[in-house]
Amino acid sequence: MLLRRFMQHINQQNWFAVFLDFFIVVFGIWLAFQISEWADDLDRRAELDEQLVALSDDLSENIGRLLEHQQYTEGKLTEIDELRSILSGSKAEADMQRLDFLMADVFSVLKFQVQIAAYETLLSSGNLLYLNGTLVRSELNAWQEDLALLKEGETVLMNVRDQVLLPYAIEEYSFAAAIEQTDHVRSGMQKSRLRNDFDSLQRSRKIDNMQAVQLATRSTVHRRIGKLLESTRAAKTAIDDFLKHN
């Protein structure tokens, strides 16, 4: 219908009508694109909001996990200090069962388990790009960097345990006697015939060095947990404010 009228106006050389018909067609196409883009923006914003709500929930979960992990790490630092105190004292005052327990326990490593499902969904959808230039993007970048630093520190702890402690324990230390003092061994099982000697442990440069490395590394991890806790809270606050005001 419109095309027939358009051709008729050309044949009649009614240029104003031709221009008007052309304008109507172009405007109609432009308007259709605008409506489609507007609808896409609404869908994208609804999806983004849904992903940010899920991410805010995940960050809340991570805050709770970090607080627990912080307490766990503080406990390890306290155990290292207690172990060093026992080995700095006299043999007569030493509680060998407690010493064995601490030798086994201070080198145990519990890595932080982060909840990142919502963040990975945000990344894979490409919607993170829509947050460029916002405080949310800046705070999420800081959170991701702090998380990477914590993982790096805990990897060092694992390496110290696997590459330093375990070879030493197998060759020079009755690790069985130490493990018996923890809850890793079922009660009533046959005890190891090998016992650890206080004097040799007290004189061991390796034992002292391993404690020093543990103290330094766990202190670094403890600081990084605190830093990650701050950036997690900041990221959650930025997301909640964005959802409230945008």
Image: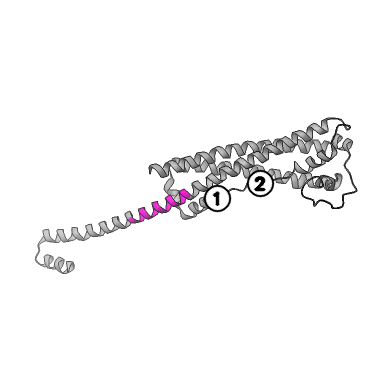
Q: Position of residue 33 (x, y in %)?
A: 29, 57
Q: Quadrant of the C terminus?
A: top left
Say what amino acid the circle numbered 1 marks. Ile
Residue 111: give its label.
2
Q: How is the image coloured?
A: one colour
> Left of 225 or right of it: where is 21?
left
**Residue ranking furthest to the top:** 89
Q: Which region is colored magenta?
A: 39-53
Say what amino acid the circle numbered 2 marks. Lys
Can I make out residue 239 in this image? Answer: yes
> Left of 27 or right of it: where is 181?
right
Upstream in sequence: badge 2 or badge 1:
2
Q: Position of residue 194 (x, y in %)?
A: 90, 46
Residue located at (29% from left, 56% from top):
35
Residue located at (15% from left, 58% from top):
20
**Residue ranking furthest to the right:** 193
Q: Secondary structure at mark 2?
A: loop
Q: Is residue 56 above or below residue 204?
A: below
Write down the residue under mark 1.
116
- The Cα atoms of the two marked residues, 2 and 1, are separated by 15 Å
Q: Secondary structure at mark 1?
A: loop
Q: Position of residue 167 (x, y in %)?
A: 81, 47
**Residue ranking furthest to the front:** 188
